[in-house]
Every structure is written in structure tokens, then in C-alpha cells.
Image: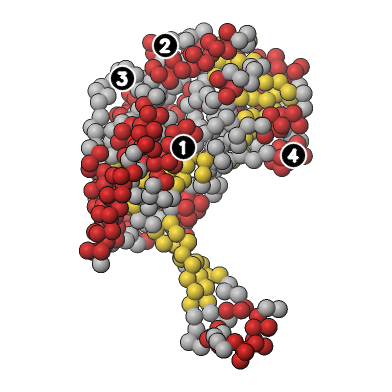
């Protein structure tokens, strides 16, 4: 058996090397466009680079170890508990690493978004693991009586995870923990744009797991491209829609199953009867948490009723003053833009809006390229063809468009690719139901933002351009395994009679066809 597995894996390894062609090169080019720029202060940003030639042998080692000893309930539970304990102990170190990569990242935002979310996900997995692993009996149907049928959860083998820079621990460890719970081994490629956090993850995982159960590949876009072309048993990628297309192309050579968590322009619809002060408070949390560098941040606001625009603008300005105090001094609660390239992109898009005559309203006086401090900014009634309305913003700029009716808002959303998130604000249940009935998004939070991501019983994933597949909780456990159908035939079954010559059992066939 081992020889056969080795031979099959070697053949797959050869195929993986061959797959690193145009698709992999395109992925490398797309990643390179998001270059890190000069490293932020706080230590050496240079990261160890995994040799591309080592990727396939590492995958082979992980797969052989998994085949030789597939993790059972006790092993999975122990792994998750040790991961939780190690992360809990090293949360201050985690926050320091992320802050160094960003130049400054709100410590509390790191603890909430990259600490609490991972701990909550592991707790949920531990609470439900035994029940999810149990075979589930299903009906075989009367025509197959007395056969019995069941669904068994079967692990896949080695799951690859390519994680992004914006929540570099959360979006690495939640899919990793889910894959471990589902009985797999894991090969992780953290983002090269947060190298200190990648080193933290490498150290954390080496403390918890043997190298034959979890491995980490570090390096830039070339390593990411080669990683995506490996013959993994499943690949989870979180990132932009553009790069997601390249990952899908690279994985296609091996028909690697994918979970793609992408992005897009997630709208907020503020209906006519909703209080602008409460809308502003909740939009401010969704948009300026992590300085807007969130895949499900509200990307633009559709406000029903022009007469309410000034009230919403004033309320948003008041929120910035109350939360960040004008961004004076250290502005410790406000996260910086991750690198110079991202800062320059946001500034370029804002300059385009000004050049096109848009009303641009900075909500704080501080705006410092040297510190990559980008002030929360509103852009009022921007035209459809500027970058801020075509591309995912991924920063603290919030366009606000006035529409005349809820129907107009729905038409605006439906004229664009399906978003990763949608945020209807209304006190009228029928208005919310109208939005839910006539639109489709990856996920919805009603009268707030972001929170559906944190609900472990809700699957998280996009639709169309915003993603393929879903994870979190039971959805992730099922996605990173195989729902194996098993039919148990009895010693004597009526189907034994269904064989030629059929004239002998014609009445039985007629009975089955009724």
C-alpha cells in the first residue's frame, strides 16, 4: 500500500511541477502588483523563503503521514486544544507581530478580530466535533428495501490554505483549525505582505503540530503561485477576486477542489425610516474597523432620500470624532494602511474622485503618508465609472449615493456582481424582506455590519464573483471532508431478482415503476 501511495504521489508531484506554467505566472504577476513597499519600523521584515522545489516533497510527506495514520477523534480534539492553549498564551506576541507589519494596528482590534474569532471557532469545533463525526443514517428508499443507507464524514487528506494579509491570523487559523477538525493534515501559505505575522504563525504551529501534520510555506508571489499549482486535496484561498481567478486557473490542472473567499463591493442600503445616527454608528464600525481593510466592510452606501444625506454625513463625522478624536497624537485605536502601495492606490482613487468633481469630505484633519495614516473620508454621489465605484475599496473611503427609492437601490445592487456581504438598514420588516427576496449576496447582516461573519452556525462564503463555497462551523467541517454515501445490502434483497431474463420479473418491474 505504501509503495502504491508513494508512486501515485510522485506522479502527482510531477504533474504539479508541470502545472506551474501560464496560470502560475499570472498568479505571481497579480500578487506582485500588491507589493509590500518599504518595510514598516519594528524589526527586520525579511522572511525566510521556502524553496519552490521543496513544496511538492513537503506535500508528499504530509500526505504519506496522513495515509499511514489518519487522525481520529482523540487526535483531532487534542490538536485543537493545544492550538487554542498556545494561541491564548501568545496573544500579546501575535498583536505585536501584526502591529509591526502594519506600521500600527490597533491592539484591541487584533485581539478581537485575530484572537477572539479564532478562539471562538476552535471552541465551536470542539463542542460539536464528536456529533459531526458520527455516521448519519438516511433512508435508502422503499425500492431498495431491506438495504440501509448512511452518510459518513471522511477526511480528504492534505488541505492547502492561502491566507491574506488583512486579518493574517484569523484567516489562516480558522480554516486550518477547521481542516484539522475534519481529520486532515494542512499545508499553509501565509501572506508575504505580513512577514512578521507569517513567522509568528510558523513558530506557533511548529510548537503545536509535528511537521508531518502541519507545514508552513513562506515566501513571495512565486511561492504562492507554485503552491496553488500543487495537487492538494482541497485548497482554501482568501483574497481578491482578481487573484482568486488566477488561483482557480492554477488549481485547474489538478482539478483541485476549491473554497474561494473573495471580495467585491458590499453595499449598505439605508432605508427612509431608519435613524441616521444609528446607521452612522454601525456603518462606522463596519467601515473603519481595521481602517476599512476588511473583505466584508460596507463598500458604499445607498441612502434612500436626499433630504437625509446631511444628517447621515454629520452623524458619520461625529462618530469619527467620538472614536478617534480627530486622529491626533498616536491615534492608537486607528489602524494604518498595510503598505505604501495600498496607501498610494487609495490616494490615487481619491484624487480621481476630486478631479471628476465629486464632493470629498475628510472626516479628520490628520492624513499622513509617512505613517500610512489615511483619514476616514466620504465621497458623495460619485459617478459609476470612477475606480471607487468599480473596484473593491479595501480602505477607509466610503462613497455615499442617494437614491430615490428602495427599488432603485435594489436595481443598483443587482446591476453589479453579487457581493460578499449586504447590509440592509430598516425598521420595517417588509422592506428588509423585499431586499432579501430581490437580491443575492454571500451573507447578510440586517441593521448592522460584519456580525454574520462571527456567527459560527452561519456558513461564510461568497457567490459568483465574491466566492465559491463556504466555511465556518458545520459548513466548513463538511466542505473540508467528503460526505461519503454508504449503502448496506442485506443478506437477502429483492433486488437480487432484478436480472435477465426480465420476463420472469415483469410484474415486479411494473410494481417498482408505479
Look at discs 1 and 4 and give the one toward the viewer. 1
Q: Quadrant of the C terminus?
A: bottom right
Please say if 93 is above or below 492: above
- Element type where label 4 sits in the image: helix
Q: Residue at x 77, y 39 (%)?
A: 430
Q: Earlier in the sequence, mark 1 or mark 2?
A: 1
Residue 510 in sight: yes
Q: Earlier in the sequence, mark 1 or mark 4?
A: 1
Residue 114 in sight: no
Q: Earlier in the sequence, mark 4 or mark 2?
A: 2
- Element type where label 3 sits in the image: loop
Comparing 159 with 257, the one in front is 257
Residue occupied by mark 4: 434
Comparing 77 with 175, the one in front is 175
Residue occupied by mark 3: 39
Quote the CA–CA distance across marks 2 and 3.
14 Å
Is disc 1 in contact with disc 4, using a CB cutoff of under 8 Å?
no
Dividing the picture into quarters, in which one does residue 119 lie?
top left
Q: Residue at x 41, y 50 (%)?
A: 255
Packing grade of label 3 (10 A; few <14, some 14-19, many >=20) is: many
Q: Residue at x 30, y 36 (%)?
A: 223
Please say if 56 is above or below 64: above
Packing grade of label 4 (10 A; few <14, some 14-19, many >=20) is: few
Location of residue 501 in the rendering, given as x and y in whole percent from the top left corner: 57, 89
Location of residue 444 in the rendering, given as x and y in whole percent from the top left corner: 61, 39
Q: Earlier in the sequence, mark 2 or mark 3?
A: 3
Q: Quadrant of the N terminus?
A: bottom left
Residue occupied by mark 1: 245
Please say if 97 is above or below 339: below
Quote the CA–CA distance across marks 3 and 4.
48 Å
Quote the CA–CA distance across marks 1 and 2.
31 Å
Location of residue 252 in the rendering, given as x and y in whole percent from the top left corner: 42, 46
Amino acid at each position: 500500500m505504501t509503495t502504491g501511495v508513494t508512486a501515485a504521489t510522485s506522479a502527482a508531484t510531477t504533474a504539479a511541477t508541470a502545472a506551474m506554467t501560464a496560470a502560475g505566472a499570472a498568479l505571481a504577476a497579480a500578487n506582485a502588483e500588491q507589493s509590500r513597499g518599504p518595510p514598516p519600523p519594528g524589526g527586520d521584515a525579511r522572511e525566510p523563503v521556502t524553496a519552490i522545489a521543496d513544496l511538492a516533497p513537503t506535500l508528499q510527506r504530509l500526505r504519506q503521514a496522513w495515509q499511514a495514520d489518519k487522525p481520529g477523534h482523540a487526535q483531532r480534539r487534542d490538536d485543537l486544544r493545544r492550538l487554542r492553549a498556545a494561541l491564548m498564551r501568545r496573544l500579546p506576541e501575535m498583536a505585536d507581530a501584526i502591529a509591526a507589519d502594519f506600521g500600527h494596528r490597533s491592539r484591541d482590534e487584533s485581539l478581537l478580530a485575530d484572537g477572539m474569532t479564532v478562539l471562538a471557532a476552535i471552541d465551536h469545533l470542539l463542542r460539536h466535533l464528536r456529533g459531526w463525526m458520527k455516521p448519519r443514517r438516511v433512508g435508502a428508499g422503499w425500492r431498495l428495501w431491506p438495504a440501509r443507507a448512511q452518510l459518513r464524514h471522511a477526511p480528504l487528506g492534505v488541505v492547502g490554505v492561502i491566507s491574506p494579509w488583512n486579518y493574517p491570523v484569523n484567516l489562516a487559523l480558522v480554516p486550518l483549525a477547521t481542516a484539522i477538525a475534519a481529520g486532515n493534515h494542512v499545508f499553509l501559505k501565509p501572506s508575504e505582505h505580513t512577514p512578521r505575522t507569517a513567522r509568528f504563525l510558523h513558530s506557533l504551529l511548529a510548537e503545536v503540530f509535528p511537521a508531518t501534520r502541519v507545514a508552513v510555506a513562506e515566501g513571495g508571489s512565486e511561492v504562492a503561485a507554485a503552491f496553488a499549482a500543487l495537487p492538494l486535496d482541497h485548497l482554501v484561498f482568501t483574497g481578491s477576486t482578481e487573484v482568486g481567478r488566477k488561483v482557480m486557473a492554477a488549481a485547474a490542472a489538478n482539478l483541485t477542489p476549491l473554497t474561494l473567499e473573495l471580495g467585491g463591493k458590499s453595499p449598505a442600503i439605508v432605508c427612509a425610516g431608519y435613524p441616521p445616527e444609528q446607521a452612522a454608528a454601525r456603518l462606522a464600525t463596519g467601515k473603519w474597523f481595521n481602517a476599512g481593510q476588511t473583505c466584508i466592510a460596507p463598500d458604499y452606501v445607498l441612502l434612500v432620500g436626499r433630504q437625509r444625506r446631511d444628517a447621515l454625513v454629520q452623524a458619520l463625522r461625529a462618530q469619527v470624532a467620538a472614536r478617534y478624536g480627530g486622529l491626533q497624537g498616536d491615534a492608537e485605536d486607528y489602524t494604518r494602511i498595510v503598505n505604501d502601495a495600498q496607501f498610494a492606490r487609495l490616494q490615487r482613487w481619491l484624487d480621481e474622485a476630486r478631479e471628476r468633481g465629486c464632493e470629498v469630505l475628510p472626516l479628520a484633519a490628520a492624513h499622513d503618508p509617512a505613517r500610512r495614516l489615511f483619514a476616514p473620508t466620504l465621497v458623495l454621489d460619485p459617478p459609476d465609472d470612477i475606480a471607487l465605484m468599480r473596484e473593491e475599496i479595501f480602505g477607509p473611503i466610503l462613497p455615499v449615493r442617494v437614491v430615490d427609492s428602495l427599488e432603485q437601490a435594489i436595481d443598483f445592487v443587482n446591476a453589479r456582481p453579487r457581493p460578499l456581504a449586504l447590509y440592509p438598514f430598516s425598521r420595517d420588516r417588509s422592506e428588509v424582506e423585499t431586499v432579501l427576496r430581490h437580491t443575492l449576496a454571500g451573507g447578510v447582516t440586517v441593521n448592522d455590519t460584519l456580525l454574520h461573519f462571527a456567527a459560527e452556525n452561519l456558513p461564510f462564503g461568497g457567490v459568483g464573483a465574491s466566492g465559491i463555497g463556504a466555511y465556518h462551523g458545520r459548513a466548513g467541517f463538511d466542505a473540508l471532508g467528503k460526505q461519503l454515501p454508504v449503502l448496506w445490502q442485506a443478506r437477502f434483497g429483492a433486488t437480487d431478482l432484478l436480472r435477465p431474463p426480465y420476463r420472469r420479473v415483469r410484474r415486479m418491474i411494473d410494481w417498482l415503476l408505479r
